[in-house]
């Protein structure tokens, strides 16, 4: 018998089989707990959650759902989020992902979605489906003794303060702070309730080790919440000296003063000699907020959020542009979902984009357009790599003037 691809059913047995396939793919436990099944019932869109089944066993998981990606300028652009893509080791290289993702992208296109998005666990997989890396992450390790040895550099102050709080207050205040922030940072995505439940231990997936975090809020002078940090710490001693590690689980700041205050707090916790700060922006302020910038060492810099254009005019008119310009893009898409030649006329006051018979300035594979969309990648760089073609001299540089953003895109979440 062949592998059957179908939507999973809304019964506990089918959900458990799907969760187990997903968990095995992520090297988690092979058996679902009742609390895992209950959580899946809460978060899954059963009209968009597929499994591949053979002999009663789920051997591949796949789901999609609607969320929003913040574009340069703060617009919240609808996107079809692709998630939970796993294939059991017994069924790799059989084309199962193609059988799921291609019709799902077509469905998203027909539903009017401007784009699709995902977090790529492996770099080489998704380019062939039209996705391109659009936002990157940086991990830092801070030597706290060096970082604050010469004191803190001057920086913004707002008369605020940091306070330790409990998980219940984080579940109340955190979503409101994130909603405020995602209109400020391009690359942010919708953060659902389930994310906060995991951060605060309200849902603990089987096979994970739970250590209750410390939670800190930054309160502005008027008492409003404008920053949040969650962290765990491990006590250790070496040669009679404290040698502990602090691990940042989340840090959000709506103002420079809140960001500075939270990092100074974390770098000043007693018995901690190293602060590990993963999933930060690639141009994060952290190194410049401590007294010795070299104390904040970059331990990793990786691609994270990938975008796949589905409706080029809708995507390009949603974002903001720092300068006025005109660009004709010949978008190549083997799947035919976003294929076409489009005239983009844009500036600080808005943009228009429509099909055109005019000659192209750039010939752009759809995946390259996904990489360019958030302003983090350079058209000149992609042209040098042969990943787009410059049909008019200077067109790539003109595209960079039009598309690049003043800060790098940042997506701190996994979805």
Image (cartoon, rainbow, N blue to C red):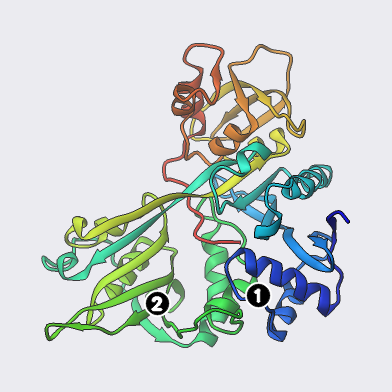
Image disc number at residue 231: 2
- Residue 358 relative to residue 347: left or right: right
Residue 20: mark: none
Q: Quadrant of the N terminus?
A: bottom right
Cα separation, mark 2 vs mark 1, equals 29 Å
Rendered location of residue 354, percent (x, y): 73, 26
- Residue at the image position 57 percent from the left and 79 percent from the top: 207
Q: Position of residue 340 (x, y in %)?
A: 73, 24
Q: Position of residue 387 (x, y in %)?
A: 53, 26
Quadrant location, the C terminus: bottom right
- Which residue appears at 57% of the width and 72% of the height? 175
| Secondary structure under the numbered disc 2 in the rendered image | strand
Residue at 49 percent across and 83 percent down: it is 210
Q: Is residue 247 above or below residue 120?
A: below
Between residues 201 and 396, which one lies in front from this camera angle?
201
Find residue 202 and report its image quarter.
bottom right
**In this rendering, does residue 85 appear at all?**
no
295 with respect to 275 (left or right): left
- In this rendering, is residue 329 above or below 172? above
Relative to 21, does residue 374 appear above or below in the rendering? above
Q: Locate residue 333: give its quadrant.
A: top right
Q: Secondary structure at mark 1?
A: loop
Can residue 210 be seen by looking at this rendering?
yes
Task: Answer with left or right where residue 21 lies relative to residue 121.
Answer: right
* Mark 1 closeness class: few <14, some 14–19, many ≥20 residues within 10 Å: some
**Horizontal and vertical percent for residue 332?**
68, 25
Rate crowding at label 2 as few (under 14), some (14 to 19) or many (20 or more) other CA atoms within 10 Å: many
Q: Which mark is on residue 30?
A: 1
Q: Which residue is at the front of the view, 91 or 397?
A: 91
Instruction: State left or right for residue 211 relative to residue 191.
Output: left
Between 301 and 220, which is closer to the camera in this rendering?
A: 301
Marked residue nearer the N-terminal end (2 or 1)? 1
């Amino acid at each position: 018998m062949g592998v059957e691809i179908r939507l999973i059913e809304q019964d506990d047995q089918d959900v458990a089989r799907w969760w187990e396939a997903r968990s095995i793919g992520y090297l988690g436990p092979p058996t679902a707990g009742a609390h895992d099944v209950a959580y899946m019932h809460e978060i899954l869109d059963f009209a968009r959650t597929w499994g591949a089944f053979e002999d009663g066993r789920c051997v591949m998981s796949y789901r999609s759902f609607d969320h929003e990606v913040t574009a340069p300028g703060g617009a919240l652009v609808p996107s079809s989020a692709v998630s939970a893509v796993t294939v059991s080791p017994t069924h790799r290289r059989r084309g199962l992902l193609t059988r799921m993702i291609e019709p799902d992208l077509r469905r998203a296109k027909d539903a009017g979605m401007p784009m699709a998005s995902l977090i790529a666990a492996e770099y080489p997989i998704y380019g062939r489906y039209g996705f391109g890396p659009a936002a990157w992450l940086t991990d830092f390790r801070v030597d706290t003794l060096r970082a604050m040895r010469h004191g803190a550099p001057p920086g913004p102050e707002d008369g605020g303060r940091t306070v330790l709080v409990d998980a219940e207050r984080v579940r109340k205040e955190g979503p409101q702070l994130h909603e405020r922030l995602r209109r400020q940072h391009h690359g942010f995505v919708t953060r659902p309730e389930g994310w906060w439940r995991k951060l605060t231990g309200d849902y603990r997936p089987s096979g994970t080790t739970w250590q209750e975090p410390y939670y800190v809020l930054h309160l502005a002078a008027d008492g409003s919440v404008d920053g949040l940090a969650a962290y765990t710490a491990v006590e250790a001693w070496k040669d009679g000296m404290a040698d502990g590690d602090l691990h940042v689980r989340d840090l959000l700041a709506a103002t420079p003063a809140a960001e500075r205050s939270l990092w100074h707090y974390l770098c000043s916790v007693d018995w901690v000699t190293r602060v590990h700060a993963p999933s930060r922006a690639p141009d994060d302020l952290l190194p410049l907020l401590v007294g010795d910038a070299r104390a904040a060492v970059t331990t990793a810099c990786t691609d994270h959020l990938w975008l796949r254009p589905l409706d080029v005019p809708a995507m390009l008119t949603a974002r903001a542009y720092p300068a006025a310009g005109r660009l004709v893009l010949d978008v190549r898409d083997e799947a035919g979902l976003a294929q076409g030649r489009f005239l983009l006329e844009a500036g600080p006051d808005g943009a228009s984009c429509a099909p055109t018979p005019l000659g192209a300035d750039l010939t752009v594979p759809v995946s390259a357009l996904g990489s360019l969309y958030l302003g983090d990648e350079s058209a000149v760089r992609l042209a040098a790599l042969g990943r787009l073609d410059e049909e008019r001299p200077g067109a790539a540089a003109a595209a960079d003037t039009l598309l690049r953003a003043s800060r790098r895109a940042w997506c701190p979440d996994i979805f």
